[in-house]
Amino acid sequence: MGDDSKRPHPALVALLLAVSVLMLAMFPLALYANTMALIDGYKASHGTAGTPGTATVESAVDTSDEQVCRGTFTPDDGGPATDARIEVEGRCEEGQQVEAHFMPGRSTLFTGYSEPRAWAAGAGDWGAFIPLVVLFGLLSLPLVLLVWMIVAKLAKRLLNGPAAPTI
């Protein structure tokens, strides 16, 4: 009886397990968001994705760790101009015009980007997502291993049938 008093209540164990699994499940979602941002930025800055057009820098603000350029993107096909963050190689200047590819952004709860961006050729800002992709990939590993162990155990039970009682 003294041994049972030291054990946590099963409901508490189930709650802690559920919270842990939910937290682990968020890492693959963040991994997906950052991987998509990385791929979109890479492809657009290399001219293989997005809408081609011209971006005009209207403001360039230096923050503590980067320069943020904003302006207007006008598609080559004559569509409407769109306000966007503009990614250029190096630093940008107000009034600067660059050929760019427009990506509308992806709305997400996680890091990644949700605002529209115009990527000029050679813009390397997409590389900022690499550490996040690696981080969330490593943080997703425990969930992948947990799922693998559960699937392996279920497959073993299905293939071998119920275990015979031991005497």
Image (cartoon, rainbow, N blue to C red):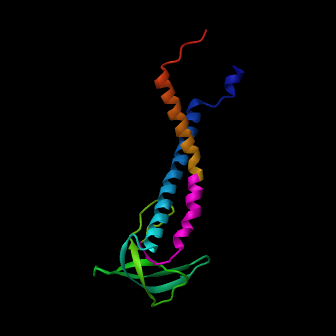
Give the answer, above or below, for where 120 lies relative to 137.
below
Segment tinted magenta in the rendering: 116-137
Q: Quadrant of the N terminus?
A: top right
The residue located at (59%, 51%) in the rendering is: 139
Confirm whether the magenta stretch covers residue 119: yes
Residue 48 picture quarter: bottom left
Residue 132 picture quarter: bottom right
The residue located at (54%, 65%) in the rendering is: 129
**Image coordinates for residue 138, horizontal then vertical, percent:** 60, 52
Q: Is residue 77 left or right of residue 121?
A: left
**Image coordinates for residue 4, horizontal then vertical, percent:** 67, 24
Residue 152 seen by the camera: yes
Residue 100 picture quarter: bottom left
Q: Is residue 104 left or right of residue 2?
A: left
Farthest residue to the right: give it. 2
The residue located at (38%, 71%) in the rendering is: 50
**Image coordinates for residue 104, horizontal then vertical, percent:** 38, 70
Give the answer, above or below, for where 140 lies relative to 34.
above
Confirm whether the magenta stretch covers residue 88: no
Q: Quadrant of the C terminus?
A: top right
Farthest residue to the left: give it. 78
Q: Nearer the viewer, residue 12 or 140?
A: 140
The residue located at (48%, 85%) in the rendering is: 59
Q: Nearer the viewer, residue 154 or 16?
A: 154
Farthest residue to the top: give it. 167
**Image coordinates for residue 99, horizontal then vertical, percent:** 41, 82
Number of marks: 0
Give the answer, above or below, for where 128 lies relative to 1.
below
Residue 19 seen by the camera: no
